[in-house]
Amino acid sequence: MTKIFQNKIIAVLLILVSQIVLAQKKDENIGTEVVNVVKPYTPTISDAFKVKETPALEDQDNTKKEVIKYSIFSFPVASTFTPSKGRAANVDKSESEKLYKNYLTLGLGNYATLNAELFVTENISDTEYVGGMLRHLSSQGGIKGVALDDKFYTTSLDLTYGNQKKNLTWNADLGYQNQVYNWYGLPENFSPIIIDGINPQHTFHNFYAGAKFSLNDSFFKEGSLKYNRFWDARGSSENRFYVKPSFEFDVLNEKIKTNFIVDYLGGSFEKELFGTNTIKYGYTNFGVNPSVVINKNDWSVNLGAAVFYSIDNENSKNKLFVYPQINASLKVVGDFMIFYTGAEGSLDQNSYRDFTNENPYVSPTLAIAPTDKQFDVFAGLKGKLANAVSYNIRGSFQNEKNKALFKSNNFTEDSINEDYEFGNSLGVVYDDMKTVRFFGELNADFSKKVSFGINGTFSSYTTHNQEEAWNLPAVKLGSNLNVIITKKWYAGANVFFVGERKDLQVNTDILTLVAPSPMTLTSYFDANLHVGYKHSERLTGFLKLNNIGNQAYQKWMNYPVQGFQVLLGASYKFDF
């Protein structure tokens, strides 16, 4: 079967080969054929040519410009309008008040009060000037219910010479002051015999000489020095000398200001209270206070510190103090609201003269020492409620060591006592104290003619050893009003309120089983008015009314003040 099939295939192949051979042999020319080759269409984009904005024209005639002539055909028009000449509007000019270099003031009042002031200054060259001030205030007393003489007077003379040059400004000062006060604050129930034997008069003297100077275009900016000699009629004396130079350096594009101080104080009291020993004191304090001010955007920061080295000359004790001096402010809403905060501290050197300026009824038996004001941390807001209304609100926490407090001296009824040992003087005690204080004030200029201000201070004290913060009020309020009524008349008012204070005094001659308790000094309100009349540019008259409520309040224990007071006077300005 297989063979038969193979034979058939071979036969077919032979027939095909024979046919092909025969065909080739039959016609050698195969002829021509037309073959069309078809290709898919592929479109292309030819190059684009940009048309020039300003075509180049070959025609030279097109570049010539045609000259065009214009003419206006005018003819007159009838008009009845006649313009008037321009004239500037009148401006109301206020007459400038002439300034005088010198003035004299004289006033007289009840209680035989005399108030006088004379100020004189004169230029002796283009850069030099001299000046002087003479002041006097006295009263012959007459306070109701006071058994001892209560008159007082104070007279002072101050002289100055100054020189103002381009790069150097300096002035020298010289002065003397004489004060007379009386220890009239005697407790009740003293026998007339003892009262007649008391001479309460006390006299102070003060002499000073100093100078101040400042330089431009120098790292040494300014400085001051002063010598002060203070003494009284009871054998007390005190010398004080200080130098305060100030330098300014540029470090890393920041200005660093550095203040230095050398403060010497030395003095003595003839005797101690109810004793015979002499009291001597002396301190030399060296201080340095570097600071730098950084302003960035609405922030202003003053970074600094104060370092003091204090030498107790009498007790050979030295101590180093370091205090912060940091202040910062932020403009929250421009000048309308400014937030400020800081922490400050200092070493405050107390002195006999400083104490008598605050309270002239102290005894010449004081303990003098510096106060270590460790820090005063505060924060507040200030700014404007309107263009003419400003405010300031501040809260603070203060920590002080060796804080000086006025306290009434204990007393006896012994006729051989000194004139200030009958309970009619105050002493000084020291204690560590913490104070929380809130302060607020508001000032308004309603117009150029009316201004008003009000302020208040609220304090809370914490003492360490003393039973109370002696003679320090918890509340103090004040307000003032000034009005220009007409070109000739002006007036003003000043009122203040002082809250209760505490004090303690013991008659050691009276034996008691009950410990004495602090006494409360009642709060008081004082109102004062003044009215003035400008007769001319030179002459002005005035009337002052003080303590209008006629209150016999006590500023210090057993020390009532003068009642209703009237002072009438005039002031005269002049030039040489």
Image (cartoon, grey):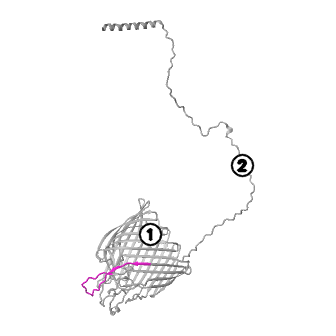
Please name the residue shown 73% across and 60% down the image.
79
Q: Nearer the viewer, residue 26 or 159?
A: 26
Question: Looking at the picture, does residue 86 appear above or below residue 509?
Answer: above
Q: Quadrant of residue 489?
A: bottom right
Give the amino acid type for the residue marked by disc 1 in the picture: Tyr
Q: Quadrant of residue 413?
A: bottom left
Based on the picture, tell me whether residue 499 belongs to the magenta stretch: yes
Number of other residues with Cα within 10 Å of mark 1, as a class: few under 14, some 14 to 19, many 20 or more? many
Q: Earlier in the sequence, mark 1 or mark 2?
A: 2
- Relative horizontal placement of residue 352, taking residue 91 as reference (left or right): left
Q: Report the residue marked by disc 1.
A: 391
Q: Report the residue marked by disc 2.
A: 70
Report x, y in % for residue 197.
Answer: 34, 92
- Relative horizontal placement of residue 63, taking residue 367 as reference (left or right): right
Give the amino acid type for the residue marked by disc 2 in the picture: Tyr
Tag count: 2
Based on the picture, tell me whether residue 87 belongs to the magenta stretch: no
Q: Residue furthest bottom?
A: 193
Query: In what quadrant of the picture does the C terminus appear?
Result: bottom right
Number of other residues with Cα within 10 Å of mark 2, as a class: few under 14, some 14 to 19, many 20 or more? few
Which residues lie in the magenta part?
A: 495-519
